[in-house]
Amino acid sequence: MSLQTGGELAQVESAIIDPATLKVVAYVVEGQTIDEHPSLLLVDDIRELSTIGIIIDSNDEFMASDDIIKLKPLYELEFSVIDKHVIDQDGKKLGKVIDYTIDIDSFVIQQLNVRRPLLKSLNDAELLIHRSQIVEINDTQIVVRSGKVKQKKTAVSKGHHYVNPFRQNSPQPQPESIDINQS
């Protein structure tokens, strides 16, 4: 939407994402008022992101893909997180990315929405994966930390004494013995 005219200028076709930082650096836009096809809109030129759309100053913000030398390698990479397979570090399939959430101030992807495979979707239809859980991103998949927690092995004595972690190791008072046969 244009801040000057209040009308629609273009529609977002896709996002240009830097796979190293998971930051949206620009958007590919299409529309009747655009001269160059495809045209890019840098995130630095966005005034506001709202429920009605992206608000910019005017048509002058759109640039041809060849005009932005810095972004040309990212544009040609055509990287997208949508439809990427997600697996954990153990190689277990978690699902496929169907959407993502960005921080509107920095345009950095914060969470991935992952659709579960058919059998696993009976318990959980979708997973939310925070960016801090991501270990690796490559051409075909996103690898995230496993959900397993490694437990420390504790030494058990030969007498098979088990330690209750909820019981304190303080001495317990001894009950007094009463002899009822004394009168």
Image: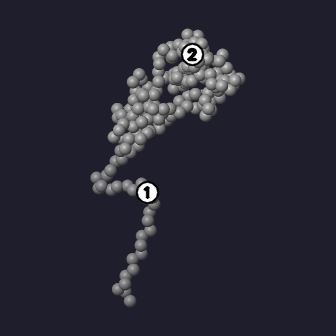
Name the foreground residue: 42 vs 4: 4
Q: Quadrant of residue 45?
A: top right
Q: Which residue occupies 43% across, 59% down?
A: 167
Name the foreground residue: 96 vs 70: 96
Q: Is residue 130 left or right of residue 161?
A: right
Q: In this view, does 90 lie to the left or right of 73?
A: left
Tag 2 secondary structure: strand
Residue furthest to the front in view is 32
| Residue 36, position as x, y percentages in the image | 57, 12
Q: Residue 90 carries which label?
A: none
| Residue 99, position as x, y percentages in the image | 48, 32
| Residue 157, position as x, y percentages in the image | 31, 52
Q: Which mark is residue 166?
A: 1
Tag 1 secondary structure: loop
- Read off the residue under disc 2: 39
165 lies above or below 62: below
Residue 25 appears in the picture as rendered: no
Q: Which residue occupies 34% across, 48% down?
A: 155
Q: Quadrant of residue 10?
A: top right
The residue type indicated by label 2 comes to Ser
- Assign the C terminus to one quadrant of the image: bottom left
The residue type indicated by label 1 comes to Phe
Q: In this view, does 170 lie to the left or right of 91?
A: right
